[in-house]
Every structure is written in structure tokens, then in C-alpha cells.
Image (cartoon, grey):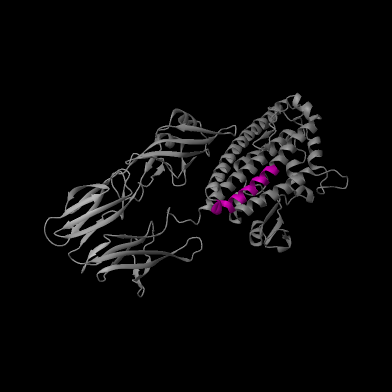
């Protein structure tokens, strides 16, 4: 469209307008009309591709909404409003384009279809009107009298004194209304990225004044919309004597041949779809713009042992998992006493060291950190306990965690006061000595609790451990970026879905991917699934990936894995991959 900040394609169309305008005084040659035909076909194919990308992006948006309605809901609602506005405007332009052709050819819809003016009789594509006009069948491609009368009608406005409707004027108003819907959804900071500029501009006062390169507030018009928004007319043809000739409608549709009008209307549809697609992308970015940059957040305490000998300190570390800042603080109270402040080291770990007499001790604390959404300090409480025993008592602790896991070796350390032979046995598990007081404990099948028995010269002690299943791993595909985007070649090179244990201290734990489902949308707009029964991509997946276009999205879901414990599990997370 005419206006500031034109795209290369807009400039190309503008140059073609100059060419055919210079030739209006004579018969427009077939070569010129064929050139417009070629450009129009390219724009039409682009619109089909954009429509497919829009459907895939919106489907991805719906998927995110289904997973987290509370968080995604406000952004998804904005996306739905943009989608509705885009559908209304595209339907209007498509119907206008088809009516224009029928008026020039002086045909009814049935006759036009019978004469082959449509490449396909299917006029609905993904819920929107779509008239794929066969321009080679149009006999009056160079007509500009009927097109001008139909589009311009009367130049005074929507309804002139002779009652003829100014269709171009109505089209410009609809474009401005749609552009405003997009601006409301993605924010005025992205207003220059939208396109679709006619001869008016909407926005906050300062923005409009800067855009029209004048500080003349008399040119501003207060808009009847929520917020301090204004409009102003933009003069793109200041040399024109007639005010009408300065208008977007006159400059685009006055004495233009039918072939050029069809091309321009398809180009407008392309800009509508581009703005719609970019809106979904920006809204999806806004969902996570103020998120923490790690998966989970919470206060954790890691103790070397829950049992210590009298005279020795209780040593532990408290931290917020995945915390990246250089320093955080914690306020901690031991046994209900006065709070004491502890500071973290450069890695974000807060060292804790407590004393205390023989018996049980409890502590509570709060770690503070800044919430990126509100910029306010947020509190994360934690608590813990430990027991101080006499020197001759028994101390048993898990060297990794305070639970043991089924299906793997769990290292535990065992110590006891006194002298003589140390006896260590277990109920619900087997023990194998690894030397230096370390034992590998393996839970027996079906056990839900394990008790370790320690004795030495009449000193006996028992420690109970809870049994837990191995945690599920996280699915991943190599080469895929943090934003979920990957090139087609890199995706094919990865060749498989993998499972990885994150933030799990035990060594040697691994999972093998045994199957998954790949969901994708075909060019026809239908959703298909590919079932894979191994970690590697099967031939069906490879063929689909090979034929993928930029912006295509593939969802890997129902990912099944098998780990050391021999159990097959379905992962909670799914992978969304977008071709870049």
C-alpha cells in the first residue's frame, strides 16, 4: 500500500502502477497485463502459505492455552480478537475482489463459475472466503472505467450525493479499524511493524505528532476509543490541488485496470495475514516475557546428615534451585529463637551451620528474591530438622538424599560410636559395602519402606528410609534452540527424541525413549499424527520433516520411556518444534 516504510514487495507493486499508468493513454499491451498476472499469482501463493502458517501458529497457541489457561488466557483472548478481525476483513476483501470481476465481465456468479473464472469452486478455506480467480480467463483485464466506477463511486465519502457507494473509502476505513485491533493486541511499541498504512494513523498523541512530522495539534482528532488515542491525516500527495486526489482511495483505485486492482487486493490480504501471523508470534512471546528463566523455583535445604554426634555442628546448605543472581539472603530461626540473617555465596548457595544440645532441633527460614513480573521482593519459606545424639549412638544418613530410590544403588554412609565390630543390615533392601563406611543399598521389589539396622557392642540404632520411584526424565531433541526453533536440516540430523535426567544427583540413571506421537498440520489444513515406536524418527516423520516449510510446527507428545527400574512411563512434558 502507499505510505511510509513500504516493504520491497509494496515498492515493486508501486513501480508496476507507474508503468501501466504511463500506458493508459494507449492500449495496455498484453505483456504488461501478463506481467501483472505473474505478480498476482505470486502474491496469491504467498497468501496460501501465510494462511497455513497462521493455522499452525494459532494451533500452537491453543495448545499452550489448554496447558495453562490462567497464564495464557489473557493473551489467547487477544489472539482470538485479532483472528476474528482478520477473518472479517479478509472475507470483505475477497468478496469485493470477486464482485469486481463479475461487474467488469458483466456476469452472474453462476455464469462466472461456468466460464472458468475460478480455479476451484471451493470458496471457503479454513473458515475464510477464498476466491482463487483464474485471471487468464478474464476478457476485460485492461478495463478501468467500470473498476473506477465500482470502487470510487462518488469521491465525497461512503455515500455521495448521487447515492453511489465509495467502496474504496469503506475498504480504507475497515483497514484502519483492523490495524487498530492489531495495535491494541501487541502494543503501540510495535506499531511500525504492522504495515497497512492508508492516509490516516492512529495512536497516542506523541506518537501521532511524530509520525506526521509536525507538531500542529490542530491536525489531531480525538478518537472514540478507550484510552488517550488520536488520529491524523497523512499527506502523501501534497502537490495535488484537489483534496480528493490526495486520498489513499484516489491514488490506488482511480483509473486503474482490473488486473492491477486484483493484484492490489490480494496484496492487501497478504498484509492482513502477515499482521495476523506477527501478532500471534508477539503475543506468544509476551506470555513468557516476564517469566523466571528456569523451570522451577523453591527453597531447598541439603544436609550432610540428619544425625550428628554431640559436640559436632549440623552442617547444611539452603538455596533456591536454579537461582542465578550473585547473592540472596535468608532469615532463619532455630528452635523458635531470634532470627539470624545468612547471605549466599557468589553461586547463590547459602551455607548453614547450627549447634545445639542432645535431642531434636527444628529450624525455619525465609529466602527472599525479586519477582520479575511485579519487581517486588517475594518470600520463599523453608524448614528442616536434625537430631543431636550422644557420642556412643549411631548415625546413619543417605549421602545423596533423604529418600532411597527403587531400581538403583543408593549410597549411604554409616557411622557408630564405641568400639568393636560394626554390624549393618537392612529390612526391605540389600546392602553391599563399598568401603570407608559407605554401603550401596538396593530396594527389594515391592518394598515401600527400608529400615537400616546398625549395632556395635550393645549400641543399636534403626533408621527408616522412604522408597520412591525414579523421577521422570525430560524429553529433548538435539539442535533445537531454547525458543523451540530449528532448521529442517538440523532436525533431521538430530534423528531422534532423547530423555535426560536434570538436577538428579544419582549417577548412572538413564532412560531410553521407546515411542511417541508426532502431531502436525498438512497443507490442506487437516491435523495428522505419526506414531513412532522407537527413539529414532521413522520414515513417515522424515518425509514430513523433509517437506516442511519455515514456520511449520510439530508437536511431540505421549513420549514413552523406560529406565533403570524397568518401568515404562509416559512423560509429562511435550515438545513443540518450529521450523526456521
Confirm whether the magenta stretch covers residue 347: no
Is residue 45 visible to us here?
A: yes
Question: In the shown orientation, is residue 10 left or right of residue 382?
Answer: right
Taking depth in this image into account, of 320 and 567 the one nearest to the observer is: 567
Q: Which percent across, then down, holds residue 277?
A: 59, 44
Q: Nearer the viewer, residue 213 or 127?
A: 127
Residue 391's image quarter? Answer: bottom left
Q: Is residue 270 left or right of residue 71?
A: right
Instruction: Return the x and y of residue 153 as percentages of the image width and height.
Output: 82, 42
Residue located 80% across and 39% down the image:
150
Magenta stretch: residue 71 in it?
A: yes
Q: Is residue 304 left or right of residue 497?
A: left
Residue 21 seen: no
Picture residue at 54% right of the left edge, 49% below the top: 284
Say above or below: 213 vs 282: below
Q: Residue furthest bottom?
A: 338
Q: Which residues are magenta?
A: 69-89
The residue drawn where x is 43% and y is 30% is: 538
Most distant residue in the left direction: 420
Q: Residue furthest front?
A: 458
Vertical arrangement, residue 551 with respect to residue 380, above or below:
above
Report the side of 515 relative to 304 (left or right).
right
In x, y percent, where is residue 362?
Answer: 33, 67
Where is residue 470 drawn, in percent x and y? 35, 46
Image-quadrant location for residue 201? bottom right
Q: Quadrant of residue 90?
A: top right
Q: Kindly give the residue lying farthest to the top in the view shown.
A: 115
Task: Give above or below for 269 relative to 354.
Answer: above
Amino acid at each position: 500500500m502507499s505510505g511510509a516504510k513500504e516493504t520491497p514487495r509494496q515498492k515493486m507493486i508501486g513501480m508496476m502502477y507507474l508503468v501501466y499508468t504511463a500506458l493508459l493513454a494507449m492500449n495496455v499491451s498484453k505483456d504488461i497485463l501478463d506481467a501483472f498476472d505473474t505478480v498476482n499469482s505470486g502474491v496469491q501463493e504467498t497468501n496460501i502459505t501465510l494462511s497455513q502458517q497462521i493455522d499452525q501458529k494459532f494451533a500452537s497457541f491453543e495448545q499452550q492455552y489448554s496447558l495453562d489457561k490462567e497464564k495464557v488466557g489473557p493473551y489467547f483472548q487477544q489472539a482470538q480478537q485479532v483472528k476474528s478481525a482478520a477473518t472479517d476483513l479478509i472475507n470483505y476483501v475477497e468478496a469485493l475482489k470477486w464482485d469486481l470481476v463479475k461487474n467488469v465481465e458483466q456476469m452472474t456468479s453462476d455464469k462466472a463459475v461456468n466460464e472458468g473464472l475460478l480455479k476451484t469452486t471451493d470458496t471457503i478455506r479454513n473458515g475464510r472466503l477464498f476466491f482463487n480467480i483464474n485471471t487468464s480467463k478474464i476478457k476485460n483485464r485492461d478495463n478501468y472505467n467500470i473498476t473506477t466506477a465500482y470502487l470510487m463511486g462518488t469521491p465525497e465519502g461512503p455515500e455521495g450525493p448521487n447515492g453511489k457507494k465509495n467502496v474504496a473509502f469503506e475498504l480504507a476505513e475497515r483497514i484502519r479499524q483492523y490495524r487498530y485491533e492489531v495495535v491494541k493486541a501487541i502494543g503501540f511499541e510495535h506499531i511500525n511493524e504492522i504495515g497497512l498504512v492508508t492516509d490516516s494513523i492512529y495512536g497516542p498523541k506523541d506518537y501521532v505528532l511524530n509520525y506526521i512530522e509536525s507538531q500542529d495539534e490542530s491536525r489531531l482528532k480525538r478518537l472514540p476509543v478507550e484510552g488517550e488515542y488520536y488520529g491524523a491525516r497523512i499527506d502523501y500527495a501534497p502537490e495535488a490541488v484537489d483534496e480528493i486526489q490526495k486520498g489513499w482511495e484516489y491514488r490506488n483505485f482511480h483509473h486503474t485496470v482490473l488486473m492491477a486492482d486484483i493484484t492490489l487486493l490480494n496484496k492487501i490480504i497478504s498484509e492482513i495475514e502477515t499482521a495476523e501471523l506477527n501478532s500471534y508470534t508477539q503475543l506468544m512471546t509476551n506470555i513468557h516475557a516476564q517469566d523466571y528463566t528456569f523451570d522451577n523455583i523453591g527453597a531447598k535445604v541439603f544436609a550432610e546428615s540428619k544425625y550428628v554426634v554431640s559436640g559436632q555442628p549440623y552442617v547444611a546448605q539452603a538455596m533456591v534451585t536454579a537461582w542465578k543472581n550473585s547473592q540472596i539472603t535468608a532469615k532463619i530461626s532455630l528452635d523458635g529463637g531470634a532470627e539470624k540473617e545468612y547471605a549466599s555465596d557468589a553461586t547463590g548457595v547459602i551455607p548453614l551451620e547450627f549447634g545445639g544440645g542432645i535431642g531434636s532441633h527444628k529450624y525455619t527460614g525465609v529466602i527472599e528474591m525479586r519477582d520479575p513480573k511485579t519487581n517486588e521482593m517475594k518470600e520463599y519459606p523453608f524448614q528442616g530438622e536434625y537430631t543431636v545424639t550422644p557420642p556412643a549412638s549411631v548415625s546413619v544418613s543417605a549421602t545423596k538424599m533423604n529418600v532411597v530410590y527403587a531400581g538403583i544403588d543408593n549410597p549411604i554412609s554409616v557411622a557408630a560410636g564405641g568400639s568393636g565390630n560394626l554390624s549393618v543390615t537392612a529390612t526391605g533392601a540389600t546392602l553391599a559395602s563399598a568401603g570407608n563406611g559407605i554401603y550401596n543399598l538396593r530396594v527389594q521389589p515391592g518394598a515401600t519402606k527400608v529400615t537400616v539396622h546398625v549395632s556395635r557392642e550393645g549400641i543399636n540404632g534403626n533408621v527408616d528410609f522412604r522408597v520412591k520411584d525414579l523421577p521422570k526424565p525430560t524429553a529433548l531433541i538435539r539442535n533445537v534452540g531454547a525458543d523451540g526453533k530449528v532448521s529442517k536440516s538440523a532436525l533431521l540430523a538430530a534423528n531422534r527424541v532423547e530423555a535426560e535426567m536434570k538436577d538428579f544427583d544419582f549417577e548412572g540413571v538413564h532412560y531410553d525413549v521407546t515411542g511417541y506421537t508426532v502431531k502436525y498440520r498438512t497443507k490442506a489444513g487437516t491435523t495428522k499424527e505419526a506414531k513412532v515406536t522407537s527413539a529414532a524418527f521413522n520414515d513417515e516423520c522424515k518425509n514430513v520433516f523433509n517437506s516442511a516449510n519455515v514456520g511449520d510446527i510439530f508437536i511431540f507428545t505421549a513420549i514413552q520411556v523406560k529406565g533403570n527400574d524397568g518401568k515404562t512411563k509416559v512423560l509429562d512434558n511435550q515438545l513443540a518444534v518450529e521450523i526456521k
